Image (cartoon, rainbow, N blue to C red):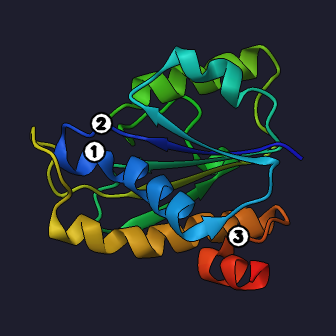
Amino acid sequence: MRILVLGIGNLLLGDEAVGIRIIEALERRYVLPAHVEVLDGGTSGMELMEVMADRDHLIVADAILTGSAPGSVAVLHDEEIPALFTRKVSPHQLGLSDVLMALRLTEEFPRRLTLVGVVPESLEPGIGLTAVVSQAIEPALAQVVAALRYSGVEAVPREVADAECD
């Protein structure tokens, strides 16, 4: 089983960084098995193709534009994620959609794809999330953990893992 949890975002554009902050919280708070890779994809595009290829489950955390209220969390699966991004879903949809299309063409598309997104309040230049998007990290992180559980992976809270080691 090869699983990748990928955070995407730009740390210099306010709430655009939410995908990165979600995976940072995942790594800080949970212990994951060795077959689960967690990666900060930043604003990378096609250079992520190799690391995303042939995954059993690809979980992407990102800022997404759905028209819902800022701070809303949305979870999309497989075909629910627009293959060609016919409407703007992510501020960096070009890079992500290009990689997903290329993976389809090379027959290396992940067997399961989950997008956990948070609607941004501000994409203005600046470091730090708005308060409303900061509050969305917890429910978004819970959705990432649920996606892992769907693939049979139990994310063990660090305090539990540390207590078991004592």
In this rendering, position of residue 94 left or right of residue 126: right
The amino acid type of the residue labelled 3 equals: Ala
Q: Looking at the image, can residue 69 be seen? A: no
Q: Are marks 1 and 2 in contact (CB under 8 Å)?
A: yes
Quarter of the image where the C terminus is located: bottom right
Camera sees residue 159? yes
For residue 99, above or below residue 70: above
Q: Quadrant of residue 132?
A: bottom left
Q: Are marks 3 and 1 in contact (CB under 8 Å)?
A: no
Nearer the observer: mark 3 or 1; the answer is 3
Task: Label 1: state its secondary structure.
Answer: helix
Residue nearest the viewer, comparing 38 with 67: 38
Pointer 3 residue: 155
List the single residue furthest toward the front.
166
**What residue does disc 1 label?**
16
Q: Which residue is mark 2?
A: 10
**What amino acid does circle 2 point to?**
Asn
Residue 1 in the figure: left or right of residue 158: right
Disc tally is: 3
Residue in view at x 71 percent, y 77 percent: 161
Sequence-wise first label, 1 or 2: 2
Q: Earlier in the sequence, mark 3 or mark 1?
A: 1
Q: Are marks 2 and 3 in contact (CB under 8 Å)?
A: no
Kindly report the distance in space between the C-alpha atoms of the residues bearing marks 3 and 1. Answer: 25 Å
